[in-house]
Image: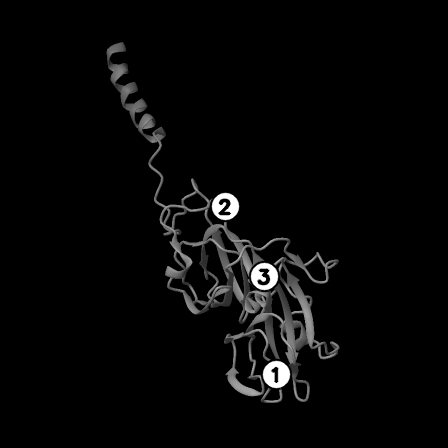
Amino acid sequence: MKTAVLPTLALLVSPVAVAQTPSPAPPDTKKDIQLNTQNPIKPEGAVPVKAEPHHVLVFQNDYVHVFNVTVPPLDATLLHQHDLPYIYLMLGTADVINAVAGKPEVHLAFEDGETRYTPGAFAHIARTDAGLPFHNITVELAHPQASPRNLPEKDNDRPLGSCPQSAADAKRNEQVPFEQVLPCFETSEVRMELVTVEGGKDYAHPTSDTAALLVAMSNANLDVSLAGEHVAFLHTGDVLWLPVGKARKVVDFLGTRSKFLLVAFKDSGEAAAK
């Protein structure tokens, strides 16, 4: 009897042992992009921002590199490196996943006209998992930036590099008082302002002791003149460099309210005088 029982027990125990052996974990099919978390600053495989195909370089000089960034719905950028500090302007609403190398992914939602500043020195991927396009103008600042702060300086409860009143807010609330030039942000090297023009309220600056970059916001219809001569018609996302020493005039030529960012470069006047 004892001899007969042992094989029976062996047959009963064997399947249990097999069932308790852990099976290999199935591959993660939800993520096809793996971030290198060993080096969050320059992870292996990150391309320079100029080599990332969703970032189209539209203007550059000694002060700025300007990119028109467009990521279609349900798409993603390559893992790319931002070495320089930059300001960006959102064109349209967006819902995006920001996957910075070495950090947890962050879900970001933006309104049309929002701006931000970042010091750079990171690599990331931007994904449009929510099915909305992601479109912005990224203004890389070629010179080192110190002491970034919102304007007015007491207004520190909003994100760094944002403006006190977004373009979207102005559209929703027609009772907002008209302020043509609204200071937003500055560093030791740059100052950013939000400028509004509408019928009969042109932007005119007879003297300019610093150069500036003009970035047209959504639905803008701008006629720009320098030193009394027409130089450009600008619409959503268009950029124009405004040199030192030339009188500036910006007109909303369709008679509707148009907005643009004006990023002035503080040391450009001294450089032009040399």
Residue closest to the eye, 150 or 104: 150
137 and 202: which is toward the camera: 202
Instruction: Left or right? Give the position of 133 relative to 202.
Output: left
Q: Nearer the viewer, residue 120 or 104?
A: 120
Q: Quadrant of residue 181?
A: bottom right
x, y percent for residue 42: 42, 47
Q: Is residue 161 left or right of residue 24?
A: right
Query: Few, some or many C-alpha atoms within 10 Å of disc 1 (few <14, some 14-19, many ≥20)?
Result: some
Residue at left offset 43%, top offset 66%: 73
Question: According to the image, what is the colour scheme of the structure?
Answer: one colour
Q: Position of residue 77 (x, y in %)?
A: 41, 59
Q: Residue at x 51, y 84 (%)?
A: 231
**Res 96 label:** none
Give the quarter of the figure containing the N terminus: top left
* Residue 11 appears in view: yes
**Front disc: 3 or 1:** 1
Please provide percent x and percent y for residue 118. 56, 56
All told, the count of numbered labels is: 3
Amino acid under disc 2: Lys
Against 162, residue 205 (above or below) is below
Element carrying mark 2: loop
Q: Secondary structure at mark 1?
A: strand
Mark 3 to mark 1 CA distance (whole Å): 26 Å
Label 3, on which residue?
116
Residue corresponding to mark 1: 249
Residue at 63% x, 75% y: name it.
208
Q: Amino acid at mark 3?
A: Arg
Which quadrant of the rendered structure holds the C terminus?
A: bottom right
Where does label 2 land, which residue?
A: 103
- Rate crowding at label 3 as few (under 14), some (14 to 19) or many (20 or more) other CA atoms within 10 Å: some
Q: Earlier in the sequence, mark 1 or mark 2?
A: 2
